[in-house]
Image (cartoon, rainbow, N blue to C red):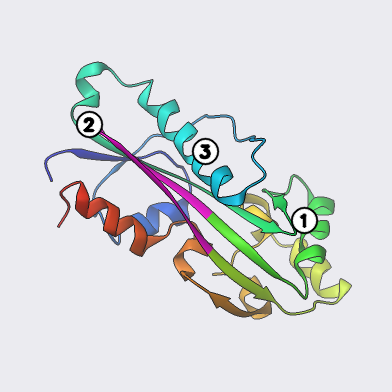
Amino acid sequence: MDKTVILCSGSPRRQELLRLLVPEFEIIKSEADETCSCSDAGQFAEELSKRKAYAVWNRLTEVRRQEVILISADTSVWLDDEEFGKPKDRQEAFRMISRLSGHTHAVVSGVTVLDAEREVSFFEKTLVSVLPMSAEEIEGYTCSREPYDKAGGYGIQGRFSRYISGIQGDYFNVVGLPVCHLWQVLKTFGFE
């Protein structure tokens, strides 16, 4: 691949996962608005991933656009048609984890791959089941640093893993990037 890959995300988890597919890439954080009025989880995730990609694309020169492939992603957590973003404070994290406790929710990531010739956007959905948690367990978890930069207020790969009773779908999607699906798309862009 002779084009430079740019990841439109500052997420350390996405960077780590993308390195499984593309060893070297640049990072340009997208400053796109992350609000969306879509009530469909897949549409919501795809819309935000496109918005993030184009926020970076529009900052590039015309010449630079010919030399790059952008990858952007947005991950959200959904329960009963309610979207759970990143909690702003401990009270919001407590509310989110309390709602997820004892239920199965959906983690939906939208991904956009964009170069000068085309755009491919898709979403991946994974179901995650959380054991019932006591108020003390929720309080203990929300007192840690872990909930505050993650959709839904938890990281499946961290301390919260002790409360995950099962998943249906792509584990890496829950971490923040659907690796398998993204690789299938990248192959259509010439990756081997």
- Callout 1 crowding tier (Cα within 10 Å): few <14, some 14–19, many ≥20: many
Which quarter of the picture shows residue 184? bottom left
For residue 119, side relative to residue 45 (left or right): left
Of mark 1 and mark 3, the one earlier in the sequence is: 3
Position of residue 8 relative to residue 141, above or below, is above
Residue 59 drawn at (x, y percent): 38, 20
Q: Quadrant of the C terminus?
A: bottom left
Of mark 2 and mark 3, the one earlier in the sequence is: 3
Q: Nearer the viewer, residue 139 or 176?
A: 176
Per the image, label 1 sits on a secondary structure element best described as: helix
Q: Can you tell which mark lies on residue 186?
A: none
Q: Can you tell which mark lies on residue 117?
A: 2
Which region is colored magenta? 109-125
Cβ atoms under marks 2 and 1 closer than 8 Å: no
For residue 45, side relative to residue 86 (left or right): left
**Which is in the foreground here, disc 2 or disc 1?**
2
List the residue tagged with mark 1: 93
Task: Identify which amino acid the numbered label 1 is placed on.
Answer: Ala
Q: Residue at x 52, y 61 (%)?
A: 125
List the residue tagged with mark 3: 47
Position of residue 13 relative to residue 34, above or below, is below
- Main secondary structure along the magenta-highlighted residues: strand
Task: Identify which amino acid the numbered label 3 is placed on.
Answer: Glu
Position of residue 21 relative to residue 118, above or below, is below
